[in-house]
Image (tube, rainbow, N blue to C red):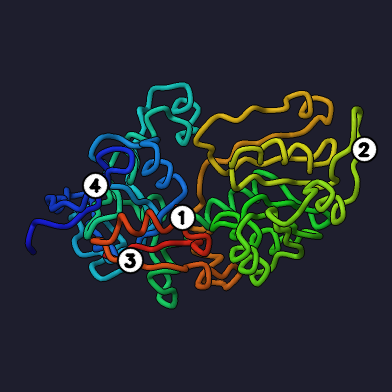
Amino acid sequence: MDRKMKAAVLKGAKQLEIQMVEIPEIGPKDVLLKIKAVGICGSDMHSYREGLYSFPNQIMGHEFCGEVVEVGKDVTDISVSDRATGFTVSYCGECYYCQKKDFRMCPQLFENFSGYGKPGAMAEYLRIENAQLDVNLFKIPDHLSDEVAATAEPLGTAIYTMLRTKPTKEDKVVIIGAGLIGNLITQVMKTVPVSKVIVTEVSKQRLETVKEMGADVVIDVTSTENLLAAVQEHTGIGKHHFGEGGMADIVIDAAAAPGTLNQSLDFVRSKGTVGLVGIPEKNPEVNSARIIHKDIRVVGILGSIIPKGLEYLAKGLVKTELLITHRFSLDEAVEAFETLESDPTAVKVMIKP
């Protein structure tokens, strides 16, 4: 194999370059994957636009499907030609969270994670270090396409969102934002199934898609004069100590746009739950008095359960084919990012090395 490969390297905000770099050499505990498809995540967009969450000369990408082309001698249960997804990760082993075995909260997580501190999948090849099947490397069922398999990671985030917000069959759920994560959360909530899913969004095209994928009610933010009233129409009016809002049991902010956090606090009923999964690029002003007087449970959501994502896809519980709206080659990576930023029809943009 020629030991050079193409990779999309982020040099800084709005500075993404296609470079020839060395194909990683694997050790006895590693595997090498040839990347078949990699999706652009919302956090990748934050890195591209603002340089957030990235390190110098970073190869991004953590939502992917790859084919195993090299296997270290100490790796078991995985073979050349298997398709897989996963991640490299390591922890300090010494901090408060590592001592509690809550490794996901280790402060060194991101500097040691694929697509953040470690090289990611926006390249022709990716090394998974210390590969362990069903721990950080997951085989892909044969009947899933490469592109669909690459959506298992964000679907795992949607599933984790469901677990964090703890919906019941009686709950009315409002989801703010119908991008990929908002759409996937919609579908996951319908598997509970909750009583009703209401989605608010600024893009008419995305609303059409999320309606097709199972949303009970969609609300076009741009053409709605009174958004709270529109939500109240479908959730009920929730009077509280100093005013009135919605009666949603759960509200998920999957947009993290200016104003959406406070919208969440308005839409949710007293003693309801607000889940924050979208990451804002600028810290919002928060009506904390609303949280207090309504006694709202606010939960942050960071993480993905990839095996569950693959399971939901394999069983057909969630569909992602129609959410993949744009495809680009690795050479077209800049165009891919610009499309996701500016095209209102874009939901999931794939790069196919």
Q: Could you give the CA–CA distance between mark 1 and mark 2, rounded to whole angstroms? A: 39 Å
Residue in the image at 37% along x and 54% along y: 337
Quick one: quadrant of the N terminus? bottom left
Q: Could you give the CA–CA distance between mark 1 and mark 3, rounded to whole angstroms? A: 15 Å
Quick one: quadrant of the C terminus? bottom left
Q: Could you give the CA–CA distance between mark 3 and mark 4, rounded to whole angstroms? A: 16 Å
Tags 3 and 4 touching, CB below 8 Å: no
- Residue identified by numbered label 4: 9
Lower position in the chain sequence, tag 4 or tag 2: 4
Q: Secondary structure at mark 4?
A: strand
Amino acid carrying mark 1 in the image? Ser
Q: Point out the frontmost of discs 4 and 1.
A: 1
Query: Where is residue 306 drawn, in percent x and y?
Result: 47, 55
Left or right relative to 227: residue 85: left
Amino acid carrying mark 4 in the image? Val
Q: Secondary structure at mark 3?
A: strand
- Residue identified by numbered label 1: 342
Amino acid carrying mark 2 in the image? Lys
Lower position in the chain sequence, tag 1 or tag 3: 3
- Residue identified by numbered label 3: 328
Lower position in the chain sequence, tag 1 or tag 2: 2
Q: Could you give the CA–CA distance between mark 2 and mark 3, rounded to whole angstroms? A: 49 Å
Tags 1 and 3 touching, CB below 8 Å: no
Lower position in the chain sequence, tag 2 or tag 3: 2
Amino acid carrying mark 3 in the image? Phe
Using the rendered view, name the quadrant where residue 272 is placed. Answer: top right
Residue in the image at 40% along x and 76% along y: 142
Q: Is residue 347 above or below residue 267?
A: below
Query: Where is residue 131 drawn, in percent x and y?
Result: 30, 51
Tags 4 and 2 touching, CB below 8 Å: no
Residue in the image at 47% along x and 62% along y: 348
Pick the front one: 153 or 268: 268
